[in-house]
Amino acid sequence: MTNLDLFTREARNLGKSARTKARLMDAAVSVFARDGFEAASVNEITRAAEVANGTFYVYFKDKDEIATAVAYRIANDVVQQLDAAMVGVSDAVERVSCATRRFLDLASSTPQWGQALFRAVWIYNDLRDSVVSYLRADLERGVAQGVFSVEIDDFLISTFSAMTLSALFRRLNGDAGPDAGSRVAELQLRMLGVSPDLAKQVAFQDLEPITLIMPVIPRETERSKKN
Amino acid sequence: MTNLDLFTREARNLGKSARTKARLMDAAVSVFARDGFEAASVNEITRAAEVANGTFYVYFKDKDEIATAVAYRIANDVVQQLDAAMVGVSDAVERVSCATRRFLDLASSTPQWGQALFRAVWIYNDLRDSVVSYLRADLERGVAQGVFSVEIDDFLISTFSAMTLSALFRRLNGDAGPDAGSRVAELQLRMLGVSPDLAKQVAFQDLEPITLIMPVIPRETERSKKN
DNA sequence: GGATTTTATGAGATATATGTCAATTAATCC
DNA sequence: GGATTAATTGACATATATCTCATAAAATCC
């Protein structure tokens, strides 16, 4: 019942089954973050959610199903918040830097979600694609604007993403401080062909302290149908 | 009994227990590569090694112990071969590019070892440090030579490593071709402050086709003591 | 407040993993 | 080739995981 149980909060006004499902998903997030995806067991999840073992199977077929559900919800959330944090930024250099920095701030502000996202991104390819969907557009915009001198393809994007995830990993482990976002953004911009001076300036410029940590809470619509 | 059972080959002239241990280690490599470290079981390893379950426990306390043994042997091997492949290269730009490219070629030439190394590097920090030990020196050399304009610290090194590992990951999955090494080396050099033109030139220049895939085979010394 | 539907439960059947050990087989020594 | 030592075996005790299902409890309806 900490303030990190975001699914539960989100389901507060929904039917009972939705609330139980949400508790299971919050529990799964913390167990995945603590034990890793492979080592996590359904038993651990139900224990953390304080429900009986059998209850799990009312809502999910198996561990994979809840993992997928959780991962996609988190990814969706992250994409939404990044989008919101970047309206009005039109310069490609700034957009790319901003996205990396916001992503790191967001993912490390709720470490359990960050951990879960980190692990999920390695497992679900299409999920990674959805999180980085905006990235390709921004990179191509930069090439069009003549500020990036590099070929944009899957290889570049996965290299770019690996840099961000590595920074997140260090951040979550306490090996890097709050400047991790700026540092990695600077390196990314240099890699893309931005001059070292500009890269440093953009990556370290102040960022408006927008904080939209809470997910959008859906309205209660009708009685929840089966499931 | 494929030509990938390198530990077994290495132990060919040693005592029986050394050979059995080597079989187990080869089996562990292939099981870790196939199933991942977490999902691998001792039973799977003994099955792959074609020995009884109990035999495993004669040589290793548990899965962690064999994993550590295997990981450190592989890392040691890789470091040795990289060292050997780089004698005579003194320019820092070339050394850094060469190391990345050789590492990728090596790790993807024996994919099971590459997979095992990839997973191990994420788990064992000190192992990563050992694989990367030469890297720090080369980076600092580049700064001293005035060709890299970046601060060399743990953050930079982990970012650099993440780029290499990401390329390895794609290479092992067939998402990238033989030019993966050159491509990522080019991006790394740009990140370090090398001009785009020079980065491309160095990263794509021909590499002497040195192939030292086989590990050094230790001589039979004396009767193997206990263990 | 009694009937009906929804939700939750936990014992149990099934499966698979770990680690031990007395017994067996293979290798070595003289 | 018989004795001694080294190496291997696989059944077994223990533990933990998965998934099912008859039953119980809770919520909802009228």
Image (tube, coloured by chain):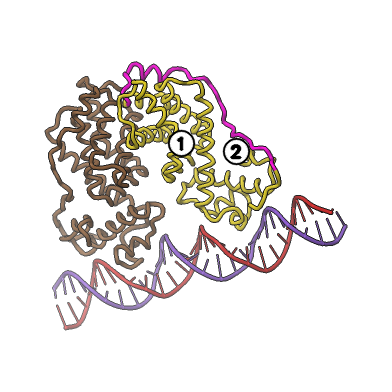
Chain colours: A yellow, B brown, C purple, D red
Q: Which residues are magenta?
A: A192-221
Pinpoint the chain carrying mark 2: A
Q: Which residue is mark 2?
A: A6
Residue B221, x across and y down, in percent: 14, 56
Of discs 2 and 1, which sits in the foreground?
A: 1
Query: A115 left or right of D28?
Result: left
Query: C22 left or right of B102?
Result: right
Of the pair A174 and B171, the residue shown nearer to us: B171
Residue A177 shows in this picture: no
Residue C29 falls in image quadrant: bottom left
The answer to whether residue A205 is magenta is: yes
Q: Secondary structure at mark 1?
A: helix
Sequence-wise first label, 2 or 1: 2
Residue B119, x across and y down, in percent: 34, 46
Residue B99, x across and y down, in percent: 21, 36
Amino acid type, callout 2: Leu
Residue B66 falls in image quadrant: bottom left
- Residue A131's tag is 1
Q: Mark 2: few, some, or many residues within 10 Å (few <14, many ≥20)?
A: many
Q: Mark 1: few, some, or many residues within 10 Å (few <14, many ≥20)?
A: many
Residue A217, x across and y down, in percent: 63, 36
Magenta stretch, overall SS:
loop
Amino acid type, callout 1: Val
Quadrant containing the N terminus of chain A is top right
- Residue A146's tag is none
* Residue at 36% across, 66% down: B53
Of the pair A187 and A151, the residue shown nearer to us: A151
Of the pair A134 and B72, the residue shown nearer to us: A134
Residues at circles 2 and 1 in contact by the CB criterion of under 8 Å: no
